Each structure stands twice: as structure tokens, then as C-alpha cells.
Amino acid sequence: MGEREHGRREHVRVAVIGSGFGGLGAAVRLRREGITDFVVLERAASVGGTWRDNSYPGCACDVPSHLYSFSFAPNPDWPRTFSGQPAIREYLEHVADTFGLRGHIRLDSEVRMMRWDADALHWEIETAAGELTADVVVSATGPLSDPKMPQVPGLADFPGKVFHSARWDHDYDLSGKRVAMIGTGASAIQIVPAIAPDVQRLTLFQRTPPWVMPRTDRAISAVERWLHRQLPFTRAARRGLLWGIRELQVGAFTKRPHQLGLVEALAKANMARSIKDPGLRAKLTPSYRIGCKRILLSSAYYPALARPNVDLVASGLKEVRGSVLVAADGTETEVDAIVFGTGFHVTDMPIADRVVGAEGKTLAEEWKDGMQSLRGATAAGFPNWMTIIGPNTGLGNSSMILMIESQLTYMADYLRQLALLDGSGPGGKAALGARRSAVNRWNRHVQARMERTVWNTGGCTSWYLDAQGRNTTVWPGTTGEFRKETRTVDLAEYEVIRVREPLPAPAAVAVGVPVRASAEEGAA
């Protein structure tokens, strides 16, 4: 795997960044394609991605387990219909072992910088563990990997404990403490019911109330698991049913948001069962169309808010004065610990600052007016660079694993095309760069479809939107549609880049000058 010559850096065919679902999925697909010359660069000391980092109390998935898993690595032994973080992390460790990935994984190898070498047609990669080069980079860092901490005046002088939900401090005991939970997203609605029985007082700072539907979670019986092991078609049928139901729901989110009124009624009924105080119920009722922000699932959140030791402040945190938290509405609360459930850098992913492309610009500079890529995978100016879970590949109601697998299919064909191009022209080696015209055309198409969706018309401000108010996060269609759009690579959307071999002297030709061929020439 790879090659290391005396005095030279190691070189591999493919470098995968990250070892969550996207990175491990890419590694499995590479091996299945017969590519073994690759490494998986992981910044932490173990695999798992977001399911390693998010270990807060109550952490679980809001997608059914049999759909939130790889189709090529079915798990008949999921313990619950909506499995918790420990079971999902164990599943990812199992994938790494089952598919022989350990030898490819480089732990404690955070990528510090990646630069495209236009002369050698490869990426130069600097990591915490050393340097290497790669023909192709597959970035699978994921959008939920870098926590976002708000800049709150006075926070640095808070005398108590402060941490983000994705960096939970398990050495700090919250029992008997006065705790503030900042935010009401997917993490917060799991944390609140998990810690409320143990803390002295829990104060939830809510800037915007979420829509919350019941979470019909239950243990999967031994009989069900036996059936799934002995009769694999039952497992496949279960997964297919879960997928089909969610595909049928997509139209309401993307084309007919007015049909979501019935879902709002069900969510209000869910709230009314536990929240009897009309004043509290009013504070918890959103003013935007359901689905505009991610619909959250919990059957324990509202009962927790009704507890006598739980308070709701219907306002965001404005400043910190010593141990006192001051909300935007003036409410003051003294606490011992602050837990931030304030999300992640999704539309401004930090990895973008560490990728320098063919034009000498970072990916962050390329995306300064908003993220955009070709089919969620490749960016103009960054040859032989792909991303898993790229711009406009997120989902509002189904499993991201479905989208990841579609992108892995696209990655596999991309590498096949490169293999065919290598050696087929002058200079031998080739690279593929997304044409800017193709990237722009694809994104006009996506944004045009986005105009009717609930995410753009529902009347909310969500983490789906970037600083310019553009939805660069969600895919405005079904997972089946995305699968069709990423089944194969269309070479007409790419520029074939080659390096001309040096000619014998005295020919006045610069050695290593990139020569760009048309897609048609490269495919010939």
C-alpha cells in the first residue's frame, strides 16, 4: 500500500480524509473496485466520525437503524428501532474490521494542508503525522464534525464548566448542578430529558422552538433479529419499506409544503399531551411551517420540560456576567455549567481553508459566496478532489447513508475514468477537473428546484442556509433521483488535464507544463 522511496514522500493512489460513514464507505468501495493503494487519514485516535465525537447523554439517531446502515453491510442485530450512539459506533468499528480496513487507516493524522501540484498532477498532503502525496483526494470530513461555539460577551470569564454537546466532558458530573442548555436542536432535545432527572435545575435557552414529533422507538425483539439473520429477505424488506415511505414523503417537502399542515397538527397534539400550561405551550409552538427546520423526534422532550426543576427561557443567550447568564429578553439565570448545543460549521466547513487548488486559491476562497459543486462531489479549480456529503447532498427526512452510497458509486466511476485516461495520451498521467460551466449549470438547476421547497419558503432561518441566505445544504429531491444523477461520470462535464512529457533538447518546451485536452480527446 503506497510507496516510499529514499528521500521521497510516500505516494498513494487515493487519500481518504475522515473515518466516519463517508470515509469508511469510501474505503470499502475502493477495495471492492480492486484499489488497495489508499490510506484513510483520521485526525482522532479511533474511527467513527460524528458517532465517535457525539457521546453526550441520550445521543441516538433519528433515522431507523435498518435504514441508517450500509446496504453492503447489513446488521441483523440492531438493538433498537432507533439505535443509540454506542451501537452505531460499534457498527462502524465492525465495518472497519469486517472489510479489512485497519491496515489502511492512519489515526492521529489530522490533515493540516492539501495543495495541488499542477506539474506532477497530484496532491501534496501535510498531516500531523507526516507528509505524503496522492493522485486523488476523497474528502469525507462530514458537515457535522466541527462544533460551532457562539461568541458570547463575558463567556471567557464564566467561573463554571463550559463545553459543546459534541465535546462532552464525561469527567464532569452534572448531578446536583445548576445547568444551562443553550440551543434547541437535535442534540439538545436528547440531552434535556437525559440529564433533567439528575441536575438540581436545568434552564433551556430557546432562540427558536423546534417542531417535535413522537419518536416511536422500541427494543427489537430476539425473534425479529433471528428472522433477519436466518432469512435475509426479511431484513431487506424492512429496509425497503422504511426507504419507500420516506421517498413518498419528499414531495410535500419539495413541491407541496402546504400539505404539511396535517403533520403540524400531529406535532401540536404531541406537545399538548405533556405540556398543560398554555403559556409554556405558546412559547414552544413554532411560527414557521413544519419541515423548514429539521423535524425533531422525541417522546421524552416535552415531558422533561414539564418537570418542576426545568425552566424555559424563550430567548437566546446575550451575555455572561460572572456566573449569571443574561438572555436577550433580560432574563437572568445563575448556573454552574453551560452546555452549548449550537450546531456545527456546515456551510463554512473548516477543511475548506486547508485545500489549495490549481489556481492557488483555497476551497474556502472558491466558496466565499456560497458552497457549490458538481453533483455534490467535485469543485471547479480542484482537480482529482472529491467530497462525500458535499454541497446540496443533505436530507430533511431520510437516511444520509443512501446519499453517501450514491456518491461512492460516482467516486468509483470517476476513478475508472481516470484509469482509462492514464496512459491514453501524451505524458501518460491524467487528471480530471470539473468545468466551471458544468458546476454553474448544475447549481442553477439545484437552486431552481429549491425555490418551491419548504426549506426556502417555510418562514424560518436554519442551518441549511449560508450567510447569503442560499440553501447550499439540502438535496431538493428523492434519494432515488440523486442516485440516477450520480450513477456515472459524464466526461463532457470535466476537463482532462495532462502533463506533457519533456522533449529532447534543443526543443524549446518547458518541462512539466500542464496541457489541457478536451473531454472528447481525453476519452478517445
Image (cartoon, rainbow, N blue to C red):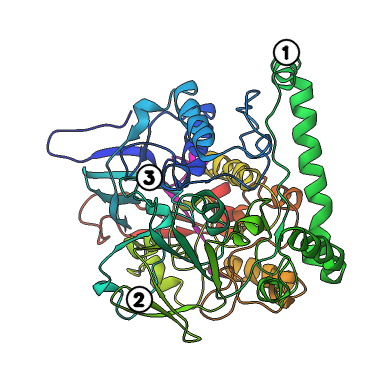
Q: Which residue is mark 3?
A: 135
Q: Quadrant of residue 453?
A: bottom right
Distance, label 1 to label 3, CA atoms, is 43 Å
Q: Secondary structure at mark 1?
A: helix
Q: Is residue 138 left or right of residue 480?
A: left
Q: Does 428 appear in magenta? A: yes
Which numbered disc flags the more N-terminal residue, 1 or 2?
A: 1
Q: Quadrant of the N terminus?
A: top left
Residue 472 belongs to magenta span: no
Report the amino acid beneath label 3: Asp
Left or right of 203 on screen, residue 134: left
Give the extent of the magenta segment. 418-436
Task: Identify the residue position indicated by label 2 in the image.
Answer: 324
Task: Name the quadrant containing residue 227.
Answer: top right
The furthest residue to the top: 230
Which secondary structure lies at badge 3?
strand
Looking at the rendered structure, the kind of residue marked 2 is Val
Expressed as whole percent of the image width and height from the top left, the position of residue 417 reads: 55, 43
Provide the secondary structure element on which disc 2 rests: strand
